[in-house]
Amino acid sequence: MAPIPATTKDAFSTLPIELSIQIIKYLNGSDVAKLATTSRHFSVVCKDKYLWLMLLERRFGKESIPEDENAYMETYKKFDHDCSFIPCSNMNIVWKEDQRYWSEEVDESSRSGTIMKLKNVCWFDVRTIVKGLPKGRYVPTWRLRFGSPSGLGGVEFGARLLSIDPDLPPTPLFTVPLTVACRDTLGRNTPWITARLPAITLPGPQDFHSVEVWMSNHDSQWKSGLFVDCLEFVDVGEGDRGVTDEEEEDEDGFVGAVATFVRGVGAALGF
């Protein structure tokens, strides 16, 4: 095939920047980064502050937008990382601030740098809400360690899908007893283990989802001997690049065509 002349422009590069932004805002951050490598036009468009403002708001909500407009892109990157990897320091832990019940400790073996050590507590509740997870299939995976555990037999892992409509109730995804998820390690001192929970599917046509994940037990028994490192959502499907047969195109097919074009370019460039 004859090489494409250097003077030839693709149709997308002839669009005004404002119109290009209105198309690109429907892509994911990873696709925007790939698109930026395809031409000078898109290199400029994909760094536009207004574009990253819209990407932030669409995926993570208005509350995610920083005051500094120059920080939109970096904020998006941070939230993109945080939605799949949650260190213990970012979790909501009941009695976390009371040193009688929990303590935060530096640990070189931790993936996040610090761990939360359960000393002794009755009302055991560790949870987090993850916003902006792309549609796809994930395995929530806790990284834990046991040290002479006591009273943890009633603890359960759970997850539920939060609705974008505040008037609609959450959709339960699963509950799994800790004794089942960690049956091979509970009751003895162990190195870090990964408690892999049931896979969850976040469906289209909604592009991004919010999921609440927890481990808890509120009975009157005292609980101790647990160390919490982090929670990770392991992508076991196509993740934010995945589309099902019925989701390949949007209503008019145009944005879907742009996304297909971008992904094809990314594949050709080795992304």
Image: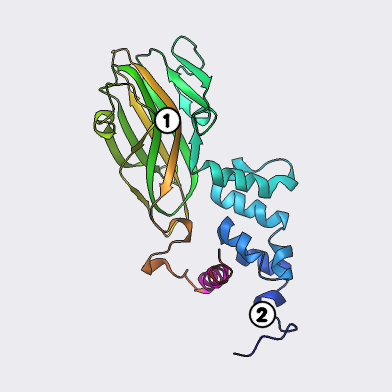
**What are the residue bounds of the magenta stretch?**
254-266
Q: Helix, strand, or loop for circle 2? A: loop
Q: Residue at x 67, y 64 (%)?
A: 36
Q: Which mark is residue 89?
A: none
Q: Helix, strand, or loop for circle 1? A: strand
Q: Which mark is residue 127?
A: 1
Query: Which amino acid is tagged 1?
Result: Arg
Q: How many marks?
A: 2
Say if the magenta span includes residue 261. yes
**Which residue appears farthest toward the top when viewing the image?**
100
Q: Residue at x 75, y 84 (%)?
A: 7
By secondary structure, the bulk of the magenta-drawn segment is best described as helix
Distance in Å between CA atoms under marks 1 and 2: 48 Å
Give residue 195's position: percent from left, percent from top. 34, 36
Q: Is residue 169 visible?
A: no
> Are there few (<14), some (14-19), or many (20+) residues within 10 Å of tag 2?
few
Give residue 210's position: percent from left, percent from top. 45, 44
Q: Nearer the viewer, residue 16 or 196?
A: 196
Q: Residue at x 66, y 51 (%)?
A: 53
Query: Which amino acid is tagged 2?
Result: Asp
Q: Residue at x 41, y 13 (%)?
A: 119
Give residue 13's position: percent from left, percent from top. 69, 75
Q: Nearer the viewer, residue 4 or 203?
A: 4
> Are there few (<14), some (14-19), or many (20+) residues within 10 Å of tag 1?
many
Q: Is residue 195 visible?
A: yes
Judging by the rendered image, the residue that carries numbered circle 2 is 10
| Quadrant in which the C terminus is drawn | bottom right
